[in-house]
Image (cartoon, grey):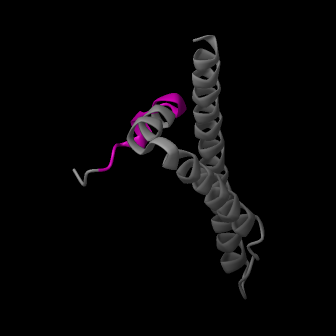
């Protein structure tokens, strides 16, 4: 709809292949950037402070922190899986070219 693939429907290997075929040598930087950004977001979520003046506010803040951590961890795990799949593609390509 907006020109972007629906990454939620793609495996890590499919996503790695998409970036590899569409961006060639730039793909490595893009994939590495995703991992770096996801790690920063995870660190930020882990460092969130639970705040609030009342018990209810504090509980809501803790719940928000836990959700942020969960979401950030999922994004980081996905970025790592894509990076690993991309690296496997590159390694396989190198091995194929060395056999030629």
Q: Nearer the viewer, residue 21 or 72?
A: 21
Q: Position of residue 73 (x, y in %)?
A: 67, 51
- Residue under the image location 57 percent in, 46 percent down: 28
**70 inside magenta stretch:** no
Left or right placement of residue 19 versus residue 52 in this view: left
- Residue under the image location 58 percent in, 38 percent down: 82
Q: Nearer the viewer, residue 53 or 9?
A: 9
Q: Position of residue 75 (x, y in %)?
A: 59, 50
Q: Nearer the viewer, residue 58 or 93?
A: 93
Q: Position of residue 85 (x, y in %)?
A: 60, 31
* 25 is higher (above) or lower (below) than 9: below
Q: Position of residue 14 (x, y in %)?
A: 46, 30
- Residue under the image location 63 percent in, 36 percent down: 81
Quadrant in the picture for residue 65:
bottom right
Q: Residue furthest front?
A: 100
* 52 is higher (above) or lower (below) than 85: below
């Amino acid at each position: 709809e907006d020109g972007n693939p629906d990454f939620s429907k793609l495996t890590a290997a499919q996503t790695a292949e998409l970036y590899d075929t569409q961006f060639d040598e730039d793909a490595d930087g893009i994939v590495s950037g995703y991992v770096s950004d996801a790690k920063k977001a995870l660190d930020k979520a882990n460092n969130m402070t639970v705040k609030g003046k009342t018990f209810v506010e504090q509980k809501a803040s803790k719940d928000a922190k836990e959700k942020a951590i969960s979401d950030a961890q999922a994004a980081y795990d996905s970025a790592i899986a894509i990076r690993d799949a991309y690296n496997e593609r590159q390694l396989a390509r190198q091995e194929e070219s060395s056999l030629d």
